[in-house]
Amino acid sequence: MNQKPLPDAVPALFPNPSDRARIGGWLTLELEEALKRIQAGPVAPMLDVQDFRVELERFDFSTPQPLEQALRWTIARMEHGIVQMSNPRYFGLFNPGANFPAQCADRIAGLFNPQLASSASSPLPVALESHVIRAVARRAAMDEQVAGHFATGGSEANFTALLCALTAAHPSFSADGVRAFAGPVKFYTSRDCHIAWLKIAHQAGVGRTALHLVDTDGAGRMDPEALVHAIAEDRAAGTVPVMVVATAGTTGGGMIDPLHACADIARQQGLWYHVDAAWGGAVLASNRLRGLLDGIERADSITIDAHKWLATTMGCAIFATSRAELLSEAFHASTSFMPSSVSSVDPYLNTVQWSRRFLGLRLFLALAAAGWEGLGAHVERGVEVIDRIKQSLIARRWSIANDSALAVLAAIPPAELGDVRALVRRVVASGRAWVAPTTFEGRDVVRICATNGETTMNDVHALIAALNERP
Ligand SMILES: Cc1ncc(COP(=O)(O)O)c(C=O)c1O
């Protein structure tokens, strides 16, 4: 055997313990200082992307630079190069200012870097994630036998639901795909659903036309009569309905589809019932608000994004199902190289992913540190913030199009403030606050959502001032 010593580990990649501790400590302090600046600074990116591309050209990776220098550069550019979720005047899409326990979880996961594909490689993380899933499912009053996992986002969790529904709908789907069905497949959401369902239909191989967008009731909720009608019409046309999806907290208006009525229809029709509570599912944390999701317990499967209102780091979603056997059926595989092969336990045999990150630690640590009470208080605080904004806007002759109990407004400005989209552009460009334009029941609205757990009344006043500035 060659007796020469092995070369040293590459120090830039694996610094010695004291350099590591020094840089790690320095980074923690730098990030704290950056957070203060982000919270006080503009919400929108203030970066000239053309200039940045030119700057990037300097990184041809031929001459390494000290890590601290690269870290300092990265933080400085990030401070101007993104919409700042950590800014308490971000009232935008559901992306949260991440809670601190979840950020700690990312550091821990980064160090241990566990591989969660298999229960033999990661017995502790697999058991821990399944404990958290069961705890969430209990809050939703789902069947005790619930199974599930953490996914990268609501889209992956919803994709999982469609695969389970298809697998449940025909015993040969797993082997033959859509050829198993006697006609084209159909599934149902309201037309106010998250439109990633179209991509999901594409991915699953059933095609985008498989998604039947059912009419809403004029208030942003699925109309149950329209759903019954749609299913009957599709059956008469020779297509094969497989799943009803109720949205619990629509993306635009925070509306909750009638969960019991949708469950009744799905049962009567023999269809899989999925509740997409990607955002609204967070209210399960609050004893005061969880009743809003009454009926979710009847779902075959649910989606809840912890990286939305529960404020973990991106992306961290929950998929849970009372029909555990369908996961094993949809995702089974067999190979000799994996260290374990335990049906219904090993994540690689029950999920879309193979290699997987320790996502569930983020919600576990948030729950461990805050309890349901703390997470519930965070969610209730968001509703309170939105309520204050609503009162201020109504006092300034705005009207509110959505009658939602959740933390989002679909607001219509008075005529003198001009067109909604132009108004939103002005607010965003000012950097003083961030809101989004959308449509609700056919009308253009300003979508204002509480996403940051540290928003103060000063931030609310800044938003109201920015929204009411005349063109
Ligand atoms: C109701 C709903 N479902 C699904 C999604 C997609 O989730 P993700 O962005 O985590 O993939 C969203 C995102 O906003 C959503 O609001």
Image (cartoon, rainbow, N blue to C red):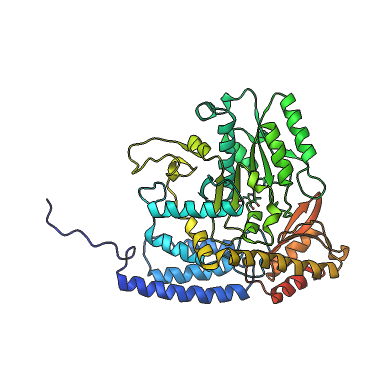
Asked whether 50 or 291 is in front, the reply is 291
Q: Is residue 98 left or right of residue 194?
A: left
Residue 319 on image: x %, y % = 55, 47
Q: Residue at (66%, 66%) from the top-left corner?
A: 90
Residue 42 on image: x %, y % = 64, 71
Extreme residue toward the front, this view = 144
Q: Is residue 456 above or below residue 213?
A: below
Q: Is residue 210 visible?
A: yes
Q: How many callouts does the rendering have?
A: 0
Asked whether 19 or 66 is in front, the reply is 19
Can you say which quadrant of the picture contains the C terminus? bottom right
Q: Is residue 215 above or below residue 7?
A: above
Q: Residue at (57%, 51%) from the top-left corner?
A: 137
Q: Is residue 8 left or right of residue 177?
A: left
Asked whether 109 or 144 is in front, the reply is 144
Residue 424 on image: x %, y % = 75, 62
Q: Quadrant of residue 448?
A: bottom right
Q: Quadrant of residue 200?
A: top right
Asked whether 132 or 418 is in front, the reply is 132
Q: Residue at (73%, 29%) from the top-left corner?
A: 234
Q: Is residue 156 visible?
A: no
Residue 88 on image: x %, y % = 64, 70
Q: Residue at (37%, 59%) from the top-left corner?
A: 112
